[in-house]
């Protein structure tokens, strides 16, 4: 008990100083050291739930690569196929284009694709949608889930975290739940990170995965917004590039289950 309390106090002090850094938390290097010492490490099932193709990549592309490179199973759940997201194209044409882009992006990240079957720009929250999404997420049996922060200017970005949250509550809060940001300032707002993950070594693949979404003008959404965001979060935690997350306070883990 004493050990646990001192660990919590350490996190608390770090959080007050600059948010809880991925540095010094049990995230990636710590896991590698444990494996090198012969400790058994099971394969994690990591789920990143986003509203549209490109959202999981933009918010979590760096950490997705870190997980997949360690041999963990990473699944990107897309609530929609981006049906309304290509100017001058019908919903069917846009969905085909953006599905192909998501496939290329996931190849870069070494992640699986899962589509949740809702319509871009017309996502819904009702009893049936809760039920349908619950089946999808429960089938993944996740060990950790990342999803959008619900305070976001895009309606679809606000829908997916509520669907995830409902499954999390029904599970008895079994898995750690983390929220990611996209286009903070322009889209995500009031985002005060509890954790930072160094993505300096994986930013190039995150960038490539985002640029796989050629129909979405990546020079703008990544080059102008997410590149600046990655650099700013890096400045906050003393690294070149970083991703930031908010851990739900009632999640079962004190920290992300890999170590930075």
Image: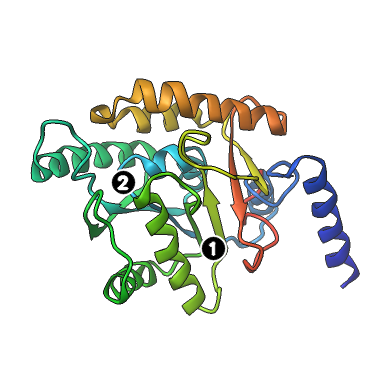
Mark 1 or mark 2, which has the lower sequence index?
Answer: 1
Q: How is the image coloured?
A: rainbow
Query: Which residue is at 23% across, 58% downward?
Result: 118
What secondary structure is found at the residue carrying circle 1? Answer: loop
The percent coordinates of residue 81 (x first, y second) are: 22, 48
The percent coordinates of residue 136 (x first, y second) are: 32, 68
The percent coordinates of residue 152 (x first, y second) are: 46, 47
From the image, state whether disc 1 or disc 2 is nearer to you: 2
For this rendering, which residue is in front, 33 or 249?
249
Q: Is residue 182 left or right of residue 233?
A: left
The residue under label 1 is 42
The residue under label 2 is 52
For this rendering, which residue is in front, 80 or 196?
80
Location of the N terminus by quadrant is: bottom right
Query: How much space separates mark 1 and mark 2, taking CA atoms?
Result: 30 Å
Question: Quadrant of the rendered structure where residue 117 is?
Answer: bottom left
Give the number of marks: 2
What secondary structure is found at the residue carrying circle 2? Answer: loop
């Amino acid at each position: 008990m004493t050990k646990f309390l001192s660990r919590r106090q350490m996190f608390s002090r770090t959080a007050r100083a600059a948010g809880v850094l991925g540095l010094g938390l049990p995230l990636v290097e710590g896991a590698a050291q444990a494996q090198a010492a012969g400790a058994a490490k099971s394969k994690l099932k990591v789920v990143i739930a986003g509203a549209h193709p490109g959202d999981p990549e933009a918010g979590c592309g760096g950490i997705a690569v870190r997980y997949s490179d360690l041999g963990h199973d990473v699944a990107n759940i897309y609530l929609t196929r981006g049906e309304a997201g290509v100017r001058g194209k019908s919903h069917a044409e846009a969905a085909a284009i953006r599905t192909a882009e998501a496939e290329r992006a996931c190849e870069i990240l070494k992640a699986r694709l899962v589509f949740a079957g809702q319509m871009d720009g017309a996502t819904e929250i009702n009893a049936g949608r809760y039920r349908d999404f619950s089946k999808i997420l429960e089938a993944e049996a996740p060990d950790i889930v990342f999803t959008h922060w619900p305070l976001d200017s895009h309606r679809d970005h606000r829908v997916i975290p509520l669907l995830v949250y409902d499954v999390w509550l029904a599970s008895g809060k079994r898995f750690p739940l983390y929220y990611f940001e996209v286009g903070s300032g322009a889209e995500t707002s009031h985002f005060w990170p509890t954790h930072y993950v160094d993505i300096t070594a994986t930013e190039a693949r995150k960038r490539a995965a985002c640029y796989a979404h050629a129909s979405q003008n990546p020079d703008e959404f990544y080059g102008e917004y997410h590149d600046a965001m990655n650099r700013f979060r890096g400045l906050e935690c003393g690294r070149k590039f970083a991703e930031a997350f908010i851990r739900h306070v009632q999640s079962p883990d004190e920290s992300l289950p890999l170590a930075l």
